[in-house]
Image: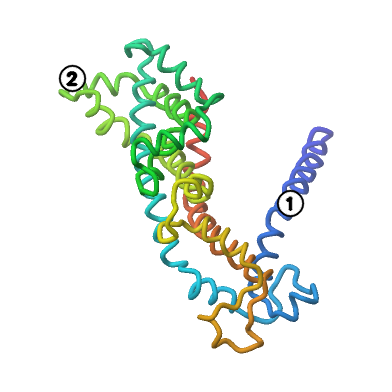
Amino acid sequence: MVGEKKFTVYSLFKYIFIAFFAVIIIYPLLHILAVSLSTNNAILSGRVKFFPIGFNPAAYKVIWFTSNLGRAYLNTLKYVTLYTIVSMFVTTCGAYALSKGLRMWGFKFFTNMILFTMFFSGGMIPTYLTMKAYGLLNTTAVIALMGCCSAYNVIVMRTFFQNLPNDLEDAGKIDGLNDFGVLYYVMLPLSAPIMSTIALFYAVAQWNAFMTPYIYLTEPVKWPVQILLRQLLLQGTVLSNEASNMSAESMVLNQSLINATIVVAILPMLVIYPFLQNFFVKGMMVGSLKE
């Protein structure tokens, strides 16, 4: 009975602790959404908390019709897709090769080189000069190639491949497959959890990327959503000439515009993440432990 009582108290404390942090995380999101959809009077009076007061989607209209949001979204989707594909190809090939251990020529050298990049880098200026020398400035290629291989993700995926039975590889070799064939036909079909997890890491990182496109993209037509977000935040109170047909009551306040832009920027990731959550948790658990 004593043990059962302690378990009950612990469970109660655990749920209270989790609920507290859930409120801390959820409240800002609800407040941002509420402000972006509330009327100007409610925003100025500070009455908006959890739920919108009134309904005023004028900020979203301004963002959509005056900020080239559609083009920025298409650019972001293009960058995320290309970056994720390139990153997954490089990471998967590197991780599978490293998972072979001492069977790989130069295993220790390449492993140490990958680990070295986790602590040291060439720096912003040498990297910029390198991209300029290769003629990659203001191109889609520079977005797809910059940081396309994370040392941490390579180590996690390598551990996952090491936990797969060696008999599977031997069976593939008996059937006449080479290393690429074993990887494509045998290993990848068994690697859905870790592949989904690493792909989500890369996709979210590129979706939120700011510095790389800010430094290397000079034409506004190539800007992703995050750069557009910055431009809107710098504009202050906005009622553009293109939105001048709005009534006075629907004028967009700076605070409402900022919150609406934040919602537009984070909404896709919030929608996608729940569908990949199971893969995310399972992939991290399997890829981070070595049996």
* For residue 120, side relative to residue 159 (left or right): right
Quadrant where the N terminus sits is top right
Displayed quadrant of residue 159: top left
In front: 136, or 163?
Answer: 136
Dot 2, crowdedness within 10 Å: few (<14), some or many (≥20)?
few
Q: Residue 242's mark?
A: none
Residue in the image at 36% along x and 48% along y: 139
Q: Which disc is residue 19 wearing?
A: 1
Q: Is residue 41 above or below residue 101?
A: below
Give the percent coordinates (x, y) of residue 108: 42, 12
Query: Residue 178, position in %: x, y?
Result: 20, 23
Q: Which residue is drawn at 15% across and 23% down?
A: 176
Instruction: Indicate the amino acid at tag 2.
Output: Ile
Write down the residue under mark 2. Answer: 174
Secondary element at image label 2? helix
- Left or right: 141 with respect to 252? left
Residue 78 drawn above or below residue 110? below
Q: Which residue is drawn at 48% across and 30% down?
A: 287
Q: Which of marks 2 and 1 is nearer the N terminus?
A: 1
In the image, 252 versus 165, the foreground residue is: 252
